[in-house]
Image: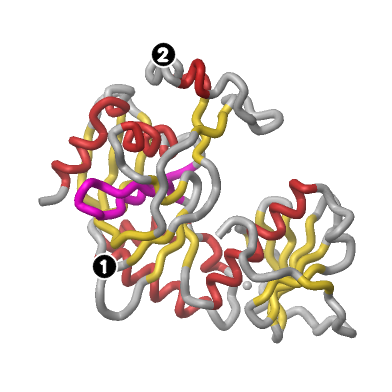
């Protein structure tokens, strides 16, 4: 997410009902920002989201997602992008925060959040854990809630787990299981949706920043380093509105109270990632 002005600054489909917007004049924007194809304006009474390609609008107001101009006629993909961004903002208003991560729950009921940039192996490692019987909380995102006391909780982000069909050699079942699966248009990795067992929520055991390498190594991260990484993977904190201080405080709480590790992983981890994670914590 990129702030594009110096002013005050992703649940999948929304569960709250959408309704047609009937408000009158638009309040002056107090912050302007960009996230992929979504242009956002934070305003005194909510947020206005505009899809830059279709120009469809969605509003976040009063805990609801409200259709704006062009929404109904826009493509399914652009409506999904708008609803996704709107849901993230709506959850943020409830002090639940999106983190760009895959999530899996170990046999003892603890959530492990695998995070890092696109292509670092989050989804692949999550699928490797799903094959071991670990329920999945998310593929490309999870929702976190950090209170002042008690554990940090991760909630499921309801989007499908997608795995590259190029991994058939490591995961032979993908040959038959994804032959007719839906893939993303124009995706060079040919990622296909795979069915996995999910779960609704779990306390967070650890954050693991993953990157691909030749030699497997897992090392602890300091809270300060973890916070820097968290801000990068929860960039919605950069929206400088009234919710930004609480958002940053929640990320700081997570960085301090949840163990963090950096995992450099070779293809060998696809078969033993569960043992690697289990050895990191008592």
- Residue designated by label 2: 169
Q: Which residue is drawn at 55% across and 48% down?
A: 159
From the top left corner, tell me how far across and down residue 56 is, in percent. 84, 59
Q: Quadrant of residue 264?
A: top left
Badge 2 element: loop
Query: Which colour scheme appears in the figure?
Result: secondary structure
Q: Is residue 19 left or right of residue 204?
A: right
Q: Residues within 10 Å of mark 1 (few under 14, many from 20)?
A: some
Q: In this view, does 199 lie above or below 175?
A: below
Q: Is residue 122 among what the camera can see?
A: yes
Which region shows up in magenta?
101-117
Q: Which residue is drawn at 18% across and 35% down?
A: 275
Does the segment drawn in magenta span residue 108? yes
Q: Is residue 31 among what the camera can see?
A: no
Q: In which quarter of the image is residue 67?
A: bottom right
Does the segment drawn in magenta span residue 92? no
- Residue designated by label 1: 256
From the top left corner, tell me how far across and down residue 25 is, in percent. 89, 84
From the top left corner, tell me how far across and down residue 254 is, in percent. 32, 66
Q: Is residue 80 above or below residue 68?
A: above
- Which is more toward the observer, 135 or 248? 135
The residue most toward the left is 282
- Which is more toward the observer, 100 or 278? 278
Badge 1 element: helix
């Amino acid at each position: 997410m990129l702030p594009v002005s110096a002013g005050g600054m992703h649940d999948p489909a929304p569960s709250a009902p959408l309704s047609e917007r009937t408000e009158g004049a638009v309040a002056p924007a107090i912050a302007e920002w960009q996230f992929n194809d979504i242009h956002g304006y934070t305003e005194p009474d909510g947020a206005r989201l505009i899809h830059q390609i279709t120009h469809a609008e969605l509003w976040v107001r009063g805990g609801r997602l409200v259709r704006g101009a062009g929404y109904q006629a826009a493509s399914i993909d652009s409506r999904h992008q708008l609803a996704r961004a709107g849901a993230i903002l709506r959850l943020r208003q409830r002090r639940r925060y999106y983190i760009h991560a895959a999530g899996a729950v170990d046999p003892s009921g603890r959530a492990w959040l695998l995070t890092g940039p696109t292509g670092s192996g989050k989804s692949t490692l999550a699928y490797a854990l799903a094959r071991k019987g670990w329920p999945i909380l998310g593929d490309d995102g999870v929702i976190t809630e950090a209170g002042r006391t008690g554990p940090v909780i991760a909630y499921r982000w309801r989007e499908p787990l997608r795995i590259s069909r190029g991994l058939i050699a490591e995961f032979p079942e993908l040959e038959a299981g994804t032959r007719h699966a839906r893939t993303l248009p124009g995706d060079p990795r040919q990622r296909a949706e795979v069915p996995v067992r999910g779960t609704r929520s779990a306390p967070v055991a650890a954050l693991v920043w993953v990157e691909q390498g030749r030699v497997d190594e897992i090392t602890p991260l300091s809270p300060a380093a973890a916070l820097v990484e968290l801000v990068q993977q929860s960039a919605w904190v950069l929206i400088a509105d009234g919710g930004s201080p609480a958002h940053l405080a929640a990320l700081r709480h997570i960085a301090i109270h949840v163990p963090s590790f950096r995992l450099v992983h070779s293809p060998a981890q696809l078969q033993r990632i569960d043992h690697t994670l289990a050895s990191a914590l008592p």
